[in-house]
Amino acid sequence: MSAKPAPAALAMRERHSALFRSYYLRHGRAVVWLLLALFLWVYGIVAMDVSPERLFIGVGELVHIAGLMLPPDPGSYAAVLVFFQALAETLAIALLGTLGAATIAFPLGFLAARNTTVSHVVRILARRSFDTLRGVDILIWALVWINVVGLGPFAGVLALISSDVGSFGKLFSEAIEAADHKAVEGVLSTGGSQAAALRFGIVPQLLPVWLSQVLYFFESNTRSASIIGIVGAGGVGLVLSEQIRTLEFGQMSFMIGLIWVTVSLIDLLCSRLRFAIIGARAL
């Protein structure tokens, strides 16, 4: 004969009855969402005609193309000059696009920040504008600007600016909202204007963060500038697309190697500059 639960245990069970229900009753909503996600995954595989046979054939073709890319072949001396000229153009596109976007987004970030905006309406408009610019892929911006200013690196610079203004504006405004306002209060308490409070209270403490973000975006935009050339926005992308169309796989692998070395060097340099700006890595 089993002993009856103590009154204290019964009271505890009644107070926390949800914890004593079965697992599926307590997590019913999670199970439903899991089943729905599984159904969507299976439906996506069927709808996109994903099959192990096609995947196996594709892997074999990938191995064949990789074999054609080895060893890398720089080609003629004139071709090497074209490669380095295109690479330098890519770096110029990334640098001008990053600096242009940061310059435009710097004042706009103050308008989008909750604690420095001139009005709530301006803040909402600035935030939605950033979302719109950031929501359009850089390749789409490149196609738009190619139709506006024509083919070439200028369209690539404008595409990077259009895309990065939204990203920089969001990051800058969020950094401003998270800034310590004691320095601002100190400037205002001494009779300083609101502009002086922003200049001497917020900008100095956020400048290292902003510069670190700009360096990171320059590193990222170097890769992006290598892609937008495929649609005619200048840089190595145009050279790569021509090599792919003419089946020059050896020269293509040489160009990819140059891009990899360049991006690695920029990554190393930007990392050193970031740590020099924001301080040594915490131990």
Image: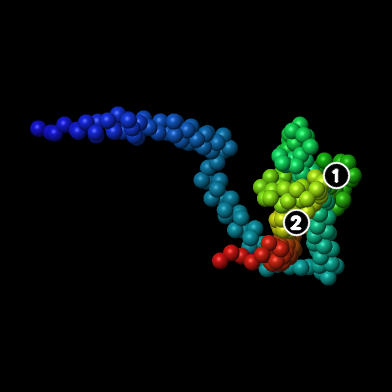
Q: Nearer the viewer, mark 1 or mark 2?
A: 2
Q: Is residue 221 visible?
A: no
For the residue marked with disc 1, what is the amino acid? Ile
SS for tag 2?
helix
For label 1, count other residues whose C-alpha is less than 10 Å away and answer few (under 14), some (14-19) or many (20+): many
Q: Residue drawn at (82%, 40%), measured in percent from left and top?
A: 144
The residue at the far front in this view is 190
Q: Is residue 24 above or below residue 274?
A: above
For the residue marked with disc 2, what is the amino acid? Pro
Quarter of the image where the N terminus is located:
top left
User: At which x and y percent is residue 13?
Assistant: 28, 32
Q: Name the residue that disc number 1 marks.
A: 146
User: At which x and y percent is residue 41?
Assistant: 51, 37
Q: Is residue 264 above or below residue 234?
A: below
Q: Residue drawn at (44%, 34%), measured in percent from left and top?
A: 30
Toward the viewer: 163 or 75?
Answer: 163
Toward the viewer: 199 or 228?
Answer: 199
Q: Name the residue that disc number 2 marks.
A: 204
Left or right of 158? Residue 216 is left
Mark nearer the N terminus (1 vs 2): 1
Quadrant of the image occupied by residue 223: bottom right
For label 2, count other residues whose C-alpha is less than 10 Å away and answer few (under 14), some (14-19) or many (20+): few
SS for tag 1?
helix
